[in-house]
Image: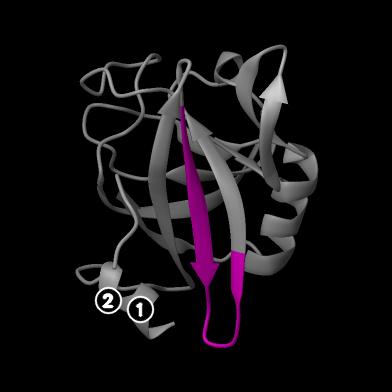
Amino acid sequence: MALITGVVDGLRPLGMIGVLCRDSEDNGAVLGTLVLADEDSAFILHSLELPWFGNARNVSCIPTGLYQAQYKFSGQRGHVYEIDDVPGRTAIQIHVGNTAQDTEGCILAGTMRGVINGKPAVLNSRTAMASLMTFTQHKPIALRVCDRMVA
């Protein structure tokens, strides 16, 4: 928890602390690891986003930085976390999906990485999101997004 707390300095976490570290880009997808923690335990998922295209709507991942994410129920996507105050963007979510075709700038979550139809993917996304909701109990997340692992 201490390592994760250090990387979200500047936010006042009201619930969970999270770090999304992007670690590779391959064939139109950015892969990373999402680590969430509370006082007692940690939870790890894999992430998939679109590559960086200057924060352009619907085609780019979000900028690195500090964010707050709130639980929301979306009629289209079900249980999601919506990331607040992304510069120039709205409705950025962590939601179910497997490949870059399943996102328009949001973050997809999976239990593992893989390949679907020759494209990079996160797998078991519905299971990952259900586990995320169980772990967080819908609490807000103080989230740092970074482009490489923090030492």
Report the front residue among 94 and 115: 115
The location of residue 34, given as percent across then percent down, is: 51, 54
Which of the 4 image quadrants contains residue 57? Answer: top left
Report the front residue among 104 and 14: 104
The location of residue 9, given as percent across then percent down, is: 22, 72
Left or right: 143, with 74 as reference point:
left
Which of the 4 image quadrants contains residue 10? Answer: bottom left
Cβ atoms at labels 1 and 2 below 8 Å apart: yes
Q: Is residue 74 above or below residue 76?
A: below
Q: Which numbered disc covers residue 6?
A: 2
Q: Is residue 7 above or below residue 149?
A: below
The location of residue 139, given as percent across then percent down, is: 56, 66
Disc 1, SS: helix
Left or right: 112, with 64 as reference point:
right
**Is residue 24 visible in the rendered structure shown here?**
yes
Q: Is residue 24 magenta?
A: no
Which of the 4 image quadrants contains residue 90? Answer: top left
Magenta: main secondary structure equals strand
**Is residue 76 visible in the rendered structure shown here?**
no
The three-letter code of the residue at mark 2 reads Gly
Tag 1 residue: 3
Q: Which numbered disc covers residue 94?
A: none
Determine the CA span between mark 1 and mark 2.
5 Å
Quadrant occupied by the C terminus: bottom left
Disc 2, SS: helix
Q: Is residue 32 magenta?
A: yes
Q: Residue at x 59, y 87 (%)?
A: 40
Q: Residue at x 69, y 57 (%)?
A: 133
Quadrant occupied by the N terminus: bottom left
Q: Is residue 49 above or below residue 14?
A: above
Left or right: 112, with 82 as reference point:
right
- The residue segment tinted magenta is 30-43
